[in-house]
Image (cartoon, rainbow, N blue to C red):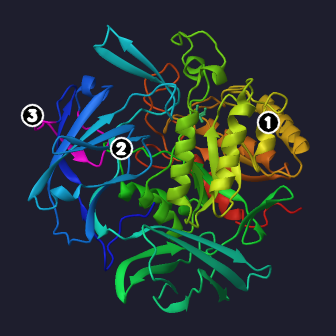
């Protein structure tokens, strides 16, 4: 899906700002009768202040009046949402315009032409934050006291923030327009040539589709013929040394420019072979983080200053990558990663596919009986949809080097293989760049029990030896970690292993004479132990810490006002361990760390 930009044929206007707001019942045919307001974009939870409203589950209504731009007879007006979490129904003047399921991908609707003469329209959005066994992420949905009080028990470990989370735009475009642009490139063995292919989808067939490539100085480097061209001596998109070309696409008919759009892209290759992960034909080592979109006040709402600060901190500590745990991040973040040369492992919001997950974390609260995850989950349709939408949105980003099909599903339970095989194939079939696919494996799905890892290209592991296993005993933790990693290495000698999570909750300022969990000293020792083991595994191609920063969770016995596994606190102040990471990661090159 194309990102909204201004071009000679398109005009974008922002609808961000202060909207009318109300939680509960409302008839959208009438004006939203409320004194309350809400910021767009943001999560509503932390700004409402009132405890009941913060935790509210159900419908939240947002409304604004917007003035329509002047539209020519051959143009149309589109309303576009970067994301609404988790379900949106959009109304114009009280009439349903469309719906979207899923809280982390963009969607848009064309406004009916009958409205274009009107001075302004009333735009209403009903935002619903219920999660259940048909949605992604997965939540346990309960109604308490009849229908009065709804509740979602997250099947995951982050706060269920909700609202209009990303930008809202109104834009005009020609009725006959460019719908999508798909860019792929094939690098020669010696990297001296790139074969470019650009496919343009449009609403109607135009006489001419003109595709020109420009460099970063805006100099024309070539024009495609039949959607193809060879670029000699291309400047590659390199890790931490990004280079972005732009493809300018023009649709022409009868000597007239119908539509034009410019799409940035990078030239780089990605490949998995011999147990290594290659970028631009060199074996790459991932240094970085699992993250969250999570900041004070904004919650999960778009916070571009925080995004930039996070990536600056990421570079400063010597890292080169992050995973969009546990959902697609904003389009703005993806564009920033492209520009800064930061490698992204891109994840769909498939988290919580584990029947007893919250019960496992909440020792006395988890009421439900153990069942078989793959018998009770009804997430297939949602899963297919998020795969399609994510790849459609992110396919051209050079920063994206791999797709994650799920985080910590019950891949050791019967039925996992039948569930995942078609989804993994779907990712492969859908991605025009054929990037590697992975699934992030949970601790319980050990090599002897797991049913799915042979289906993916990279063995991604979340491991907590020294935290959830052998808590406080780093000697035993080292033995356990080493033993398990060697098992994976032996089982899949041709697949790279990526540690996608490892970490220890740490409260800044807490110190001890001894090696005691939650202290800053323990976090330092925990990572020192983990790295010592990682360095002995030949196929281990990277380490992504859990987490970049502390983040908000729901109230749980094992959470002290959120999850504190961050290397940085929630307000981005470094913990003691950051100094150690700087030393290690600055000494590890992006390429050729593990010699084979
Ligand atoms: C894993 C999850 C992650 C949690 C983390 C933890 O993937 O979302 O926050 O462990 O427990 O289970 O800290």
x then y, percent, for residue 579: 59, 54
Query: Is residue 311 placed above or below 381 in the rendered structure?
Result: below
Q: CA distance from mark 2 to mark 1?
A: 40 Å
* Residue 81 in view of the camera: no
Q: CA distance from mark 2 to mark 3?
A: 22 Å
The image quarter in which residue 489 lies? top right
Q: Secondary structure at mark 2?
A: strand
Classed neighbour count for the residue bearing mark 3: other residues with Cα under 10 Å, few (<14), some (14–19), many (≥20): few
Label for residue 84?
A: 2
- Relative placement, left or right, of 264 versus 491 is left
Q: CA distance from mark 3 to mark 1?
A: 58 Å
Query: Is residue 390 placed above or below 525 in the rendered structure?
Result: below
Classed neighbour count for the residue bearing mark 2: other residues with Cα under 10 Å, few (<14), some (14–19), many (≥20): many
Label for residue 33?
A: 3
Q: Which residue is mark 1?
A: 481
Taken as a whole, is the magenta stretch helix, strand or loop?
A: loop
């Amino acid at each position: 899906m194309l990102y909204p930009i201004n071009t000679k044929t398109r005009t974008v206007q922002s609808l961000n700002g202060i909207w009318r707001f109300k939680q509960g019942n409302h008839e959208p045919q009438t004006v939203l009768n409320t004194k309350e307001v809400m910021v767009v974009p943001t999560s509503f939870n932390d700004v409402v202040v009132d405890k009941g409203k913060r935790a509210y589950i159900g419908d939240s209504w947002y409304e604004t009046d917007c003035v329509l731009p002047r539209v020519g007879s051959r143009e149309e007006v589109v309303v576009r949402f970067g994301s609404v979490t988790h379900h949106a129904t959009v109304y114009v003047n009280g009439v349903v315009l469309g719906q979207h399921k899923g809280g982390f991908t963009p969607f848009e609707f064309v406004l009916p032409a009958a409205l274009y003469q009107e001075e302004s329209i009333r735009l209403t959005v009903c935002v619903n934050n219920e999660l259940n066994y048909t949605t992604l992420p997965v939540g346990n949905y309960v109604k308490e006291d009849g229908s009065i009080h709804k509740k979602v028990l997250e099947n995951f470990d982050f706060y269920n923030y909700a609202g209009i989370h990303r930008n809202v735009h109104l834009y005009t475009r020609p009725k006959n327009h460019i719908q999508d642009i798909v860019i792929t490139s094939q690098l020669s063995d010696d990297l001296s040539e790139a074969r470019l292919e650009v496919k343009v989808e449009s609403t109607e067939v135009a006489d001419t589709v003109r595709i020109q490539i420009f460099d970063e100085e805006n100099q024309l480097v070539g024009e495609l013929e039949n959607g193809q061209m060879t670029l000699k001596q291309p400047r590659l998109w390199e890790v931490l040394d990004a280079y972005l070309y732009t493809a300018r696409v023009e649709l022409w008919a009868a000597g007239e420019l119908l539509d034009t759009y410019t799409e940035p892209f990078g030239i780089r290759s990605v490949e998995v072979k011999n147990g290594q992960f290659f970028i631009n034909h060199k074996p790459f080592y991932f240094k970085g983080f699992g993250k969250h979109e999570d900041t004070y006040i904004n919650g999960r709402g778009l916070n571009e200053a925080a995004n930039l600060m996070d990536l600056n901190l990421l570079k400063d500590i010597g890292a080169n990558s992050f995973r969009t745990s546990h959902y697609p991040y904003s389009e703005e973040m993806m564009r920033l990663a492209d520009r800064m040369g930061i490698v992204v492992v891109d994840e769909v919001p498939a988290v919580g596919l584990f029947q007893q997950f919250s019960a496992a974390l909440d020792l006395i609260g988890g009421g439900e009986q153990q069942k078989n995850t793959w018998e009770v989950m009804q997430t297939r349709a949602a899963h297919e949809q998020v795969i399609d939408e994510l790849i459609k949105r992110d396919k051209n980003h050079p920063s994206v080097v791999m797709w994650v099909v799920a985080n910590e599903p019950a891949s050791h339970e019967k039925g996992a293989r039948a569930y995942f095989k078609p989804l993994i194939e779907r990712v492969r079939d859908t991605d025009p760049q054929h990037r590697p696919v992975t699934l992030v494996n949970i601790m319980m799905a050990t090599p002897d029990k797991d049913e799915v890892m042979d289906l993916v290209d990279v063995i991604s592991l979340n491991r907590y030896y020294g935290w959830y296993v052998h808590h406080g005993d780093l000697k035993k933790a080292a033995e356990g970690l080493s033993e398990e990693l060697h098992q994976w290495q032996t089982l899949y000698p041709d697949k790279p292993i990526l540690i996608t999570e490892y970490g220890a909750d740490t409260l800044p300022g807490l110190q001890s004479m001894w090696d005691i969990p939650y202290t800053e000293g323990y976090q330092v020792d925990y990572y020192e132990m983990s790295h010592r083991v990682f360095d002995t595994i030949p196929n281990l191609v990277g380490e992504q810490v859990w987490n970049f920063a502390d983040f908000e969770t729901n109230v749980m016995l094992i959470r002290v006002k959120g999850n504190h596994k961050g290397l940085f606190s929630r307000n981005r102040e470094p913990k003691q361990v950051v100094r150690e990471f700087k030393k290690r990661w600055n000494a590890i090159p992006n390429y050729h760390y593990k010699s084979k």
